[in-house]
Amino acid sequence: MTNGTTPRRQRRPRRMRERVGASKPAPKAAAKAFEPAARAAEKKEEDAKKPTAAEPDAVVITKNSFEDLECNRQADVDKLCQLVVKKLKTADAKHAKAKFLHDIIRGMQGKITLPEAESLHKTCKDLWTKRKKVEDAKEKAKAEEETQGKKAELEQQEVADDDFFASFM
């Protein structure tokens, strides 16, 4: 830097030097402040509907249904299973069933014995093969239906011999 120039990283590009004195755009806060009258009225109604902590009349109760559940008898275990299955069937999350099984097995990892693990593996494998057979049967039926549809379409397109040769005469 002995030749009197500044280091390259301190220099601004030419287009940046030209813009330094240019006017800046208006702040975006002004755009957020404007809301049409209809939206502003809707927001006020929504805010009025929500209970706040300052209001003594509003009471919010959160209840965990699994905390109150005791599993002392087989009927209690069946009830728990029904609750879990119902929640899994109505779950909106992706792969909720697989994640549930994965987490359950991971939680039992140190407590489960080898014969229990083998029986669980066998059961899961049997369920998977049954599901795969059903899916394959559906796929095969769909393919068969498509081929039948194509055959029917080709038969409709064919021209009879008499009609074909009649056009030549």
Image: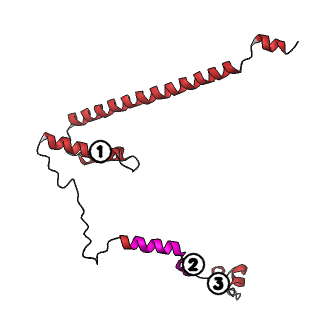
What's the residue at 29%, 44% (across, down)? 86
- Nearer the viewer's eye, disc 1 or disc 3? 1
Cα–Cα span, label 1 and label 2: 47 Å
Q: Quadrant of the N terminus?
A: bottom right
Q: Which residues are magenta?
A: 26-47
- Is residue 102 shown to the viewer in this render? no
**Which label was assigned to residue 86?**
1
Q: Is residue 98 above or below residue 53?
A: above
Cα–Cα span, label 2 and label 3: 15 Å
Q: Crowdedness of circle 2 by 10 Å Cα count: few (<14), some, many (20+)?
A: few
Residue 42 image point, x, y percent: 46, 71
- Is residue 116 shown to the viewer in this render? yes
Q: Crowdedness of circle 3 by 10 Å Cα count: few (<14), some, many (20+)?
A: few
User: Residue type at mark 3?
Assistant: Lys
User: Residue type at mark 1?
Assistant: Lys
Horizontal side of residue 31 vs 50, given as left or right:
right
- The kind of secondary structure element at disc 3 is loop
User: Which residue in the structure is indicated by mark 2?
Assistant: 31
Cα–Cα span, label 1 and label 3: 58 Å
**Magenta span has 69?**
no
Name the residue nearer the viewer: 47 or 84.
47
Residue 64 image point, x, y percent: 23, 57
What's the residue at 78%, 10% (across, down)? 162
User: Which residue in the structure is indicated by mark 3?
Assistant: 24
Q: Is residue 105 above or below residue 158?
A: below
Number of numbered discs visible in the structure rendering: 3
Residue 145 image point, x, y percent: 54, 24
